[in-house]
Image: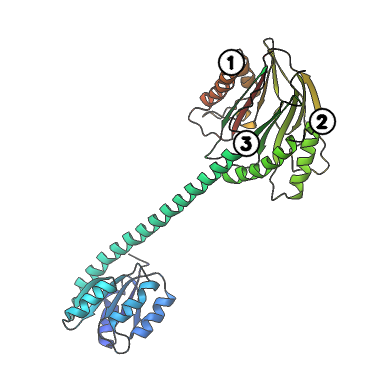
Amino acid sequence: MPGQKILVVDDEPANLQKLRRTFVHRYEVLAAASGEEALELARRHDDIAVIVADQRMPGISGVEFLRRTLELLPHAVRIILTGYTDVDALMEAINTCKVYRYIVKPWDPPDLLMTVERGLEAHRLAVENERFRKELVRRERLARELEIAREIQRSILPPACPQVEGYAVAVEYQPAREVGGDLYDFHWDPASGKLQIVIGDASGKSVPAALYAAVFSGQIRSLLAQSIPPAEVLGFLNRSLLARRQGGNYIAAACLCVDVPQGRMLVANGGMPFPYLARGGALARIPVAGVPLGLMEEATYQEAEERLEKGDTLLLVSDGVLDAVNPDGEAYDPGRVERAILEHVAGELPSCVQRIRHAVLEFVGDAEVLDDMTIIGLRRLA
């Protein structure tokens, strides 16, 4: 096998020359006349595949030399040459130095060459096994890191939708990968009669997006508890993200506040798709725009006001719904989203949002889900 290095060690010049001639036309050969010289070569060449060493040498013996190479060349194939039969010495070499074979002098070059070639195959298998082991460890570590990220995400997403008298709230969440960058949260304060909802989408995918969303989520909860108007919430979060922005990270987010007794609703938007409002068999968009958070210092956010009537359904979706792509490369465009909403909005709200998500996934089919998908529904019942 071209490119393989073989280290031969013998203090007798004739033997050393014979060893070199055995391998030189097939392999790259490194030769040393003593254990000390051979150790220096082993330190400089960490890609040595085979070591052929004489057992009896002045200074460092062959057995001692091979023992010292264990750490330097853990996967090298070790062959020891011996001119006499010392069973104890040979057993020590085999047991403590990982000796692959011992060969009695004088040796037959073709037999030695065949032994080395078999040893190289063993070396290749050992290297592949080590590579496989490291890959297995890496994957196990990655799986654990992903599990930690999932635990973080579970901790930031609400465990359930709020129970609000006279209203129904439902959510469907589908990460594109093991963990996602979409986020949502609710804050229901019966004392003030205010229900607040936030939906967001952190840039990027998987673990980095999830961790970025986790930091953002902690700030959201603090702000929602203070009953700050939606536009002010987004403005504060925008300034906060800019102050600690890393790389090109940003977050698209929409925030709404509902006066539950009155049905009055304020909506502010920073880069999310316009909300959908279904009323009496018709569907409209609430056209409130704004730049994503963490991009522009001078960004300001406006509020749109709507009144939810009995039977009205509000739907908030993330980009993963509108950007879903089927195997033919077609996007689940706004027209398809609207048709899915109108088809399913008459059902119970949890069923409605679930069926919309299923409609998107059926459209995607066997294609890869490219972005996280979140659908939040709010319906006034009375």
Q: Rate crowding at label 2 as few (under 14), some (14 to 19) or many (20 or more) other CA atoms within 10 Å.
A: some
Q: Position of residue 89 (x, y in %)?
A: 22, 80
Q: Which residue is mark 3?
A: 182
Counting residues from the start of the chain, the first of labels 2 and 1 encountered is 2
Disc 1 marks a residue whose amino acid type is Glu
Q: Which residue is mark 2?
A: 302
On screen, 189 above or below 42? above
Q: Rate crowding at label 1 as few (under 14), some (14 to 19) or many (20 or more) other CA atoms within 10 Å.
A: few
Q: Position of residue 195 (x, y in %)?
A: 72, 26
Element carrying mark 3: strand
Disc 3 marks a residue whose amino acid type is Asp
Quarter of the image with the N terminus is bottom left
Element carrying mark 2: loop
Q: Which residue is mark 1?
A: 348
Q: Which mark is residue 272?
A: none
Direction front: furthest residue: 191
The quadrant in which residue 181 appears is top right
The quadrant in which residue 221 appears is top right
Q: CA distance from mark 2 to mark 3?
A: 22 Å
The quadrant in which residue 313 appears is top right
On screen, 328 above or below 144? above
Counting residues from the start of the chain, the first of labels 1 and 3 encountered is 3
On screen, 188 above or below 349? below
Q: Position of residue 329 (x, y in %)?
A: 56, 30
Q: Residue at x 82, y 36 (%)?
A: 300
